[in-house]
Image (spheres, rainbow, N blue to C red):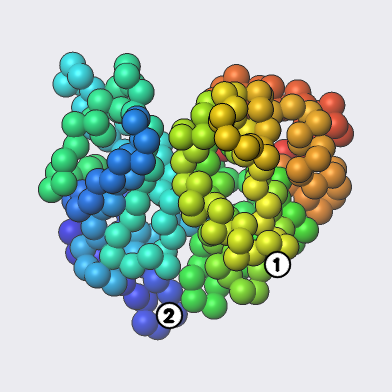
Amino acid sequence: LVCLQTDYCNNVLIGCLDPEKFVEFKLVKRTKVTHNVARFRFSLPTPTSVLGLPVGHHIRCRGNDSEGEAVIRPYTPITLDSDLGYFELVVKMYPKGRMSHHFREMHEGDFLAVKGPTSLCPPSLYGAGATEGGSNINQAKLRAFGMLAGGTGITPMFQLARAILENPKDKTNLHLIYANHTLEDIILKEELDVFASKFPNRFKVYYVVTQAPTDAWNGGVGHVSKEMIQSHCPSPGPNIQILRCGPAGMNKAMAVHLNAIGYTSEMQFEF
């Protein structure tokens, strides 16, 4: 694979992805996150290569299930094109998941077939992803995003949060409600807490768990409720948008809550 890093005439970074065919990337580091979640780092062709994935988009990964049959699933990297030479995925491996089997069996030195980018982003993010002198991530000039995430549904939210918070010209506020079963299941908690500490006026995170820790806990307990959304997300308005990404049941329940609160369909987006 020959991957050009820069279009010098236009000073634009060019990525390594191909939307028409799968390209293989080498796994160089695998880190255990929880009992069933791991962080996978894949190298790009050169130390200055970029993946070339616009914010709000995802890639399609191809592997083999336990029967040896090919399977393709979408994933959102947690890295941006400001991360040179590599990209990272955080993957939850389900006992009977077909693609989960492939990731569970991957070892450092193995290769992953990837194709993209694939677009599944809200209109407010169209055109996002430029890194040098590029456009603002928040294309619709929204005042704030509310984010409702469950489990690995945090990955597109994390990608977006990084892109906004690391852009000194972007003043968008972010309000995240992140649901998991236990405290130990919270993915990227350390990174999210750093965001909250570094950007206290722009990034708020409220954790919700179904099993409360035995120690002091200042987050929510149970399922994300309408009252939690009203307390921790921006109120309905023309300059806000609520994003959601989680298990199907959670997404459906969140849609009911959002509609009841008064968020219009234009104010909502499901990854």
What amino acid is at disc 2? Asn
The local crowd at label 2, few if under 14, some if 14 to 19, many if 20 or more residues have their Cα within 10 Å, is few
Lateral position of residue 42 relative to residue 19, left or right: left
The local crowd at label 1, few if under 14, some if 14 to 19, many if 20 or more residues have their Cα within 10 Å, is some
Identified at 42% across, 68% down, the residue is 82
Q: Which residue is mark 1?
A: 171
Identified at 34% across, 31% down, the residue is 35
Identified at 74% across, 54% down, the residue is 144
- Can the viewer see residue 90? yes
Q: Mark 1 and mark 2: span between their CA atoms? A: 25 Å
Lateral position of residue 160 relative to residue 36, left or right: right
- Can the viewer see residue 56? no
Q: Position of residue 182 (x, y in %)?
A: 52, 29
Q: Position of residue 73 (x, y in %)?
A: 36, 32
Q: Quadrant of the N terminus?
A: bottom left
Q: Which residue is mark 2?
A: 11
Instruction: Evaluate if marks 1 and 2 touch, with contact meaning CB atoms under 8 Å apart.
Output: no
Mark toward the viewer: 1 or 2 = 1
Badge 1 marks a residue whose secondary structure is loop
Residue situated in front as seen by the camera: 251 or 60 = 251
- Residue at the far left in the pictured view: 109
Closer to the chain start, of discs 1 and 2, is 2
Residue situated in front as seen by the camera: 77 or 38 = 38
Q: Where is 252 relative to 227, above or below?
A: above
